Amino acid sequence: MMNLRDILYKVQIKAVHGSTDLLISGIVSDSRQVTENSCFVAISGTTIDGHDHIYSAISAGAQVIVCEKLPAEVDPKISYIEVANTAIALGIMAHNFNGNPSGKMLVVGITGTNGKTTVATLLYQLFTGLGYSCGLISTVKYIIDGKEYPSTHTTPDALRLSSLLREMREQGCSHVFMESSSHAIHQYRMEGIEFAGGIFTNITHDHLDYHKTFDEYIKVKKSFFDHLPKTAFAISNMDDKRGAVMLQNTVAEKYYYSLLSVADFKGKLLDNNLNGLHMLINEQEVNFRLIGEFNAYNLLAVYAAAICLGEDRQEVLTILSNLPGAEGRFEYQLSKDGVIGIVDYAHTPDALLNVLQTIKKLRKGYEKVITVVGCGGDRDKTKRPLMGGVACEHSDKVIFTSDNPRSEDPIQIIKDMESDLKIEHRRKFLSIADRKEAIKTAVSLANTDDIILIAGKGHEKYQEVAGVRLPFDDKQVLNESFELR
């Protein structure tokens, strides 16, 4: 139980109707979760408006209603708190209720289109290796001091997020590394968190089903850095054409990393092969287990953050050189007869291009590249023909298949991917909607030394079809197909 006045600390209040001297048992934004003496926050969502459920919340025992507009009938026994934005209020209140755990830890947020999971995971692995107790909030999993939990969202809702941070603090975590998605930034899920730093990886075509325009998508990402405090650091990719724009209004301490330009954290790629990366980082020569130029950028971002957090350069590079990276990110297997299979989460045109360009640099010249790729349903449709074009441009053979079709027809999604292909690319592809059959077909088409890329799902252990999540693991299907060769 906590006093309402303490819960409302730092919330921008327009008006109070009733008492604030009340003990509150909990905060909810779903009227179905209301319990006796709880506080219901009415969120105006994209599909549901919590204001329509205020009466239900009161009937279920809510003692306090936080809203942007009062209901037509006001119950004199209930306290109503009017605010300009209930989503912002929810985040602040949730962190107050949970004891503001982020203020007692060093929390670093990572945002960008690609690389968030790898950077967050590497930071978690690095700082655990340095001897700290750490927390990780990522697309793949949540980890609290070594204990893993399944991930539900890249960045959870404000209530779950504040609860996770409280648990991390209670378990003794000193550092937390979290992906900060554009959806979470736009929906104010991270309000109330005191960030020690922020990292920008890159920005490319994605999520236009939600943000509508690329400019809006950029502005949302940038707003994360706009709100960092003076005490924080802000690290950006100088080689991304919007890297400088991201930090132009931040009051945090600015730092840049780059492979191509003068920067605070300068890298140079000396060699890139299936054994890993050989790099110079600020004139220090290092070998890493990770593969690909995109991972060179991820490693630079991690190195930069570690130095900004006060760690020893040599110790950081020593540990980083042995880290494996995140699950489902350029993971490769080898069949008994020498076919290479690579599973990667690439689900944007730019990410797919990065992976295929990396494969091209690893080729000896004669191997075929066979790409299995699909696009998610109920998501940005404009990237589908771009994904199809990238796959055909940089592969010898392409199999278009299902990703997570969700409520859409998988065949129509594939048709969208095929819709704008160049004439010379139309002889390169097959369409097989069944993802398992598509992977098996790719393996049957491959010869020794050929490279199969299975893109789009990476770490995921399910396929979402018609609203149902069915068990499916790209790596498992690939290995089973290899065994049958």
Image: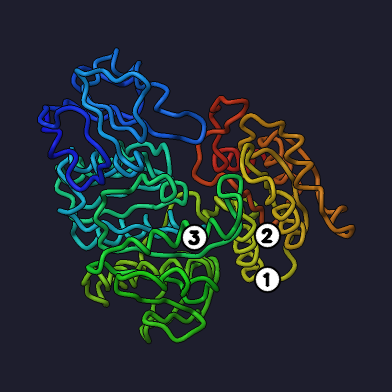
Asked if labels 3 and 2 touch by Cβ distance under 8 angstroms, the answer is no
- Measured in 3D between alpha carbons, the distance from the residue under mark 2 to the one under mark 3, in whole angstroms, is 44 Å
Left or right of residue 469, residue 357 in this image: right
Asked if labels 1 and 2 touch by Cβ distance under 8 angstroms, the answer is yes
**Quarter residue 348 falls in:** bottom right
What residue is pinned by disc 1?
364
* Few, some or many residues within 10 Å of mark 3 (<14, 14–19, 20+): some
First reached walking from the N terminus: tag 2 or tag 3: 3
In the image, 81 versus 324, the foreground residue is 81
Report x, y in % for residue 105. Answer: 18, 55
Report x, y in % for residue 464. Answer: 57, 31
**Image: 282 above or below 60:** below
Instruction: Identify the residue at horizontal 36%, vertical 39% (top origin).
Output: 157
What residue is pinned by disc 3?
219
- Measured in 3D between alpha carbons, the distance from the residue under mark 1 to the one under mark 3, in whole angstroms, is 42 Å
Q: What number is the disc on residue 333?
A: none
